[in-house]
Image (spheres, helix red, strand yellow):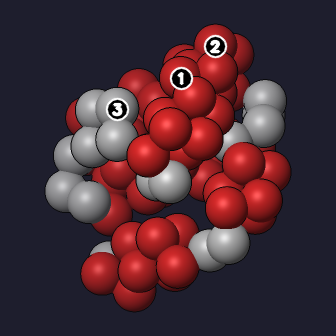
Amino acid sequence: MKSIVKFFDDLPLILKIVAALPGIDGICYGIYRIAKGHLVVGIIWIFIGATIGWIIDIVTIILNGKVTFLV
C-alpha cells in the first residue's frame, strides 16, 4: 500500500492534475485514500470523486502539490 501512496506522491504536478480530472479522479484518488488507510472515505470517494469531488482535488493539488482533502 505504501508503494501506491509513494507512486502518487512522486508524480509530476501535471500528471497529478490529469489524474484528478472527472471520471479518473474517483478511481485514482479513491485508491490513494484507501492506500493511506482511509477505507470508508476511499470507497465513498470512488463515487463522489467522479462526479464533483474532482474539483476539490484539483484545487488542493494546485495549492499544495498533493491531495490533502479527506486524507
Residue occupied by mark 2: 52
Q: Residue 62, how many percent across, how many down?
A: 60, 41
Q: What's the residue type where badge 3 is placed?
A: Phe
Judged from the image, the secondary structure of the residue bearing numbered disc 1 is helix
Task: From the viewer's side, name the closer residue of 63 and 67.
Answer: 63
Label 2, label 3: how many angstroms apart (C-alpha)?
13 Å
Residue occupied by mark 1: 56
Residue for point 39% across, 72% down: 5
Compared with residue 12, is residue 59 higher up or lower down, i.e. above or below? above
| Residue 50 appears left or right of 44 | right
Label 2, label 1: how many angstroms apart (C-alpha)?
8 Å
| Crowdedness near tag 1: few (<14), some (14–19) or many (≥20) residues, C-alpha within 10 Å | some
Residue occupied by mark 3: 69
Tag 2–tag 1 contact (CB < 8 Å): yes
Q: Residue 30, how many percent across, how many down?
A: 48, 45
Q: What's the residue type where badge 2 is placed?
A: Ile
First-in-chain label (2 vs 3): 2
Residue for point 34% across, 32% down: 69
Locate residue 20: give its quadrant: top right
| Residue 25 appears left or right of 53 | right
Q: What's the residue type where badge 1 is placed?
A: Ile
| Residue 49 appears left or right of 24 | left
Tag 1–tag 3 contact (CB < 8 Å): yes
| Residue 36 appears left or right of 21 | left
Q: Residue 58, how many percent across, how many down?
A: 63, 34
Label 1, label 3: how many angstroms apart (C-alpha)?
7 Å
Q: Give the quarter of the figure containing the N terminus.
A: bottom left
Compared with residue 7, is residue 29 higher up or lower down, i.e. above or below? above
Tag 2–tag 3 contact (CB < 8 Å): no
